[in-house]
Image: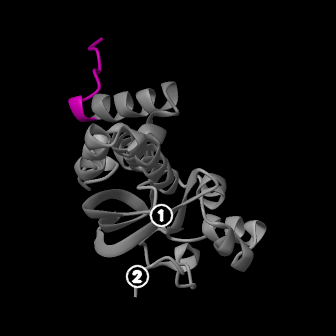
Amino acid sequence: MPCNFPSRRAMLISDRRFRTREHPSTERFQPSAMKPCYRFILLASILAFAGCSPAAKTNAPANDTRRLDEMPRGQPESADFVARVKHYYQSLEEKDWPTSYDMRTATFKQDVAKDYYLKEMAGSRENLTSYKVLSLRSYTNTRGEDTAAEMIMEFHNGEMVSYGCARWIKLGGVWMCDEPGLKSGLLINLRIPDWVPQ
């Protein structure tokens, strides 16, 4: 009795059906079904890498305080002034609003309450990334002691560059920021200092 072997086409069809029955989840892992997952993983990897990259932080130049740093060489007593100025602008760069408020003069604090200042600055777009001291002028009293200073400064706020005049005054032996030079929001002092020469 001759053997009736199935045709090659019938065997292929049967084999496909067998594999589908044996592995019912085969169709679930098609490449098209995996695309959203791959995209999510790729996007998460890119964001994680960009967040850790130093170049992603800012393209602004580093702070240039050479003119400030030169002061203590000829005037050792000005070291405190230099330290206070750097500390103040560091607080702005780090968005440390309580410190930046505490370093302002009493007249500024009379015009702007601390709670209001902190609330408004927390929601502001202030984004100081770096600064440069372009020129510096100090004022002395009759005893030859520095009591005030003015600085022409360059500021980098993100992608924007601005220029302003910063004013500092020594009150009770402590250097305080009278006018930071940044013309934005609550940082501006609306009063004209009485010590500024006319």
Looking at the picture, tell me which residue is in the foreground, 47 or 137: 137
Where in the figure is residue 65, as x and y percent of width and height?
A: 28, 49
Q: At label 2, which amino acid type do we have? A: Pro
Indicate whether 31 appears above or below 175: above
Q: Which residue corresponds to the image point at 74% horizontal and 66% vertical from the top-left?
A: 114
Where in the figure is residue 154, as x and y percent of width and height?
A: 28, 67
Q: Is the stretch drawn in magenta largely helix, strand or loop?
A: loop
Looking at the picture, tell me which residue is in the foreground, 16 or 36: 36
What range of the chain is rendered magenta?
1-9
Q: Label 1, label 2: how many angstroms apart (C-alpha)?
A: 14 Å
Where in the figure is residue 158, as x and y percent of width and height?
A: 34, 64
Q: At label 1, which amino acid type do we have? A: Trp
Residue labelled with disc 1: 168
Q: Which residue corresponds to the image point at 38% horizontal and 39% vertical from the top-left?
A: 45
Q: Which mark is residue 110?
A: none
In the displayed structure image, the side of residue 52 where residue 69 appears, left or right: left
**Label 1 SS:** strand
Q: Which residue corresponds to the image point at 30% horizontal and 74% vertical from the top-left?
A: 163
Q: Quadrant of the C terminus?
A: bottom left
Where in the figure is residue 3, as x and y percent of width and height?
A: 28, 15
Residue labelled with disc 2: 197
